[in-house]
Amino acid sequence: MTESKFTRAETKVVLTYRVLQHWRTPVFRRLASWPGIRFLALHGGDFPGTKAVNGKQLTGFEHRELATIRFDLARDDNAIPMPLCPSLPIHLFRERPDVILSEGGSNLFNNFLVFAYAGLTRTPVVWWTLGELRGSQALSRSQRLFRWLVRQMESRATALLGYSSIALEYFDRCGFPKERQFRAVNCVDTDHVLRATEASLGRADALRREYGLEGKRVLLFVGALIPPKRLEDLIHAYAALSPRHPDLRLLIVGGGSHRAALEREVAGLDIEGVIFAGQVIDDIHAYFELGDIFVLPGLGGLAISEAMAHGLPVLATEADGCEVDLVEEGANGYLLPVGDRQALEARLDQILSDPELLAQMSAHSRWVIEHRYNIHSYMENVVAAIDYARSAGAKRAGGVATSGSDR
């Protein structure tokens, strides 16, 4: 772990987030234990029936759930749960953070309050965002207004922290100065995954027997079962591949509103070997051990790094941007056009037909996680953005920056 650059004084960081999902909490625990940082998370309440719910084990860091007014912002064929926490400014005035680490556009309503407070107190803000996804389609009037509001906030942020190289390209298109841009490639706590892998082997063997996967090769999907994941594309590719690869199975891990429609899709194609395992959290490492190839045919992101830590090749389309950093074309997987079922089928067939290629891709996925993109590189860049924001904020306020070295 690299120490914070601020050595003369503790940096008080307040995070403002919609909800603290279980997959993000390892990052918050690491921030709370980072030398030179005092950390507090302020967040909203659950949105029942959606992915926007707080994790069950919010331990290892200080946090407060604020009274929440809930809104759903329509976007394409999906709705974004968006909270408004009226007491947020009171908590910010009480805490007086040195830096605010703010979730991006998905927390838009609370960010009005964040920037109002930041403007009054001259507190630096780190805007944490995926930027703008590739292939964005024409926007409706309300979506254009949303994007304009987000852009105004981004322009006022002290530092811009993106999930990927795609986010940096977006920052460049907006004309934001390079020195304000930081990239923390979106990933899970890879240390935890690598530790848990060996411990999960016994459970994986039991699951393999339970699902009848002994001697089978498995295409794996892990994520929410919602339309933007485009699981129909994967199901159709599997249906086409099954006759050529009779030992192949498709394992779909996750819950969501779209499950019944997907089950009807499978029934309509009259195919066997598709397993819907439901939502899994505690046992998820064992399920990743069942896979041979991980496929993400639609939106997502974090599951890519988790699959790679388990040594799986990855086939992805346009996820949250991290795919362009994590997936090296032909080395540990492929990036495919959205909705191109034939391309998905062809690449899967190529890997399944070449055991040596599959083994090489598996090894390279693990190498990328161990040596290039992991929780350590992630945290170092998050902290670098915080350090920059505090230094820039101190200069703006006419104070002396306490940074020990240049960025």
Image (cartoon, rainbow, N blue to C red):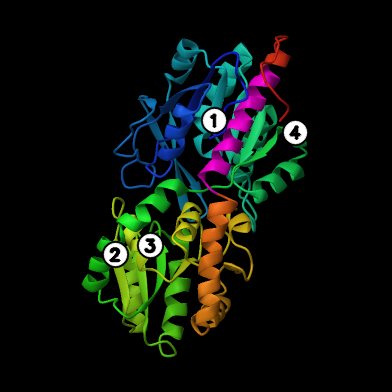
Name which quarter of the figure residue 251 lies in. bottom left
Mark 4: secondary structure: helix
Relative to the observer, which residue lies in front, 8 or 296?
8
- Depth order, front residue of 321/294: 294
Task: Indicate the position of residue 70 as horizontal and vertical percent values.
Answer: 39, 34
43 w.r.t. 273: above or below:
above
Q: Residue 102, labelled with which disc?
A: 1
Q: Is residue 271 above or below residue 315?
A: below
Q: Secondary structure at mark 2?
A: helix
Which amino acid, by three-letter code, is at mark 4? Answer: Glu
Quick one: 32 or 57, which is closer to the camera? 32
Residue 386 lies in magenta, yes or no?
Answer: yes
Nearer the observer, disc 1 or disc 2?
2
| Mark 1 vs 2, N-terminal side | 1
- In the image, residue 190 lies at what x, y percent? 46, 49
* Residue 298 covered by magenta stretch: no
**Closer to the N terminus: mark 1 or mark 4?**
1
Q: Amino acid at mark 1?
A: Ser
Few, some or many residues within 10 Å of mark 2 (<14, 14–19, 20+): many
- What's the magenta region? 374-393
Q: How far from the left and from the top, in percent, is residue 9?
A: 57, 13
Marks 4 and 2: which is nearer the front?
A: 2
Residue tagged 4: 179
Which badge, 4 or 2, is on the more N-terminal residue? 4
Q: Which residue is mark 3?
A: 288
Element class at badge 3: helix
